[in-house]
Image (cartoon, rainbow, N blue to C red):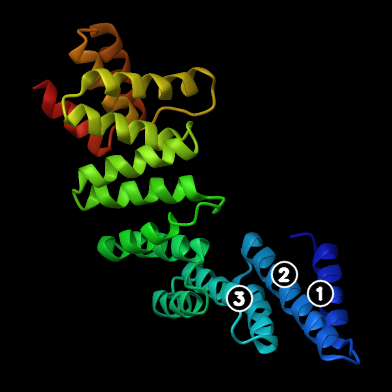
Amino acid sequence: MNGIKLVLTLLMVLFFAGCTGTGSKSENAKKNQAFDAYSRLGFEYLQSGDTVGAKQSFLRALEINGSYAEANNGLALAFQLEGDDVLAEQYYRKAISMAPESAMIHNNFGAFLFSKGRYDEACQELARATEDPFYNRRAQAFENLGRCYRLLQRNEAAKHAFQRALQVTSTRPVSLVELSELLLLENNYDESEKTFERFLTLVEKRRVEHYAKSLWVGIRLARHNAEATRAATFALILKNLYPNSIEYREYEESAR
């Protein structure tokens, strides 16, 4: 982050922390401003990759207000970036205990558990994140939940999660491809094709690019529709760009 911006932010923090007021309401307001500023500074450090500076800022916020959930969430993210999973989980749980309704913290903790292969627990946290209708990343939370359910082979629950993600934001490419594949597995070719065409529209508009799974879904749909040229085109791209992918291995096995 820009050094001047950091200095100015820090000066603002120190000003708020050093001010004294005559009334308790004034003092509380200044404390709120101080720990908010330290917390913002911590997240800016995180964005710049400085986990040490981030932890120091979050700890200062907690010195002012020990029950500040966002600072604990920030510490969890910092330790997660440093690869200290034990401390990351400890601070995630502290944050949730202080703000049990926070969709953001449930989503972050769910993503952390997902990355560790703890899918049952991850799905529970991600499901909590989807409950807040005003959460600005609700579509992402539904999508994460769908991916989590897929790994647990709960395909019906996954399909519902991807459908909800697309109801919130209709252009999420991963949800479109995942839902198309689930419909394909159900032999619901018409709906699978319609969903996949929505993804292809995004590709044509250069808003997204194909990836291994989208190409493999495209190959299977093209085969079903007897579109040999289209299937061969997708297969060539899959071979050239993703030769080591699971999808390419599945394609090779299907072509034998």
Query: Above or below — where is 47 with respect to 181?
Result: below
Q: Residues within 10 Å of mark 3 (few under 14, many from 20)?
A: many
Q: CA distance from mark 1 to mark 3?
A: 16 Å
- Residue 98, percent across and down? 52, 79
State if disc 2 and disc 1 touch (CB < 8 Å): yes
Name the residue rendered at 27%, 60% in the picture: 119
Where is residue 180 drawn, in percent x and y? Answer: 30, 29
Above or below: residue 16 compared with residue 3 = below
Residue placed furthest toward the left = 256
* Callout 3 secondary element: helix
The residue indicated by pointer 2 is 41
Find the distance from the CA under tag 1 to the CA under tag 2: 8 Å
Location of mark 3 (residue): 71
Q: Is residue 212 visible?
A: no
**Mark 3 and mark 2 in contact (Cβ < 8 Å)?**
no
Q: Report the disc number at residue 250.
A: none
Q: How many residues crowd mark 2 within 10 Å: few (<14), some (14–19), many (20+)?
A: many
At a point 46% along the width and 79% down the height, the residue shown is 97
Q: Nearer the viewer, mark 1 or mark 3?
A: 3
Write down the quadrant of residue 1 in the picture. Answer: bottom right
Q: CA distance from mark 2 to mark 3?
A: 11 Å
Question: Is 176 displayed left or right of 57 in the figure?
Answer: left
Q: In this orientation, which residue lies closer to the viewer: 243 or 167?
A: 167
Which disc is residue 10 wearing? 1
Q: Nearer the viewer, mark 2 or mark 3?
A: 3
Where, quadrant-wise, is the C terminus in this rendering?
top left
Mark toward the start of the polypeptide (2 vs 3): 2
Query: Is 231 left, or right, of 95 in this rendering?
Result: left
Q: Position of residue 69 (x, y in %)?
A: 57, 76
Residue 193 shown left or right of residue 130 in the figure: left
Looking at the image, is mark 1 or mark 3 earlier in the sequence?
Answer: 1
> Does residue 115 appear left or right of residue 106 in this picture?
left
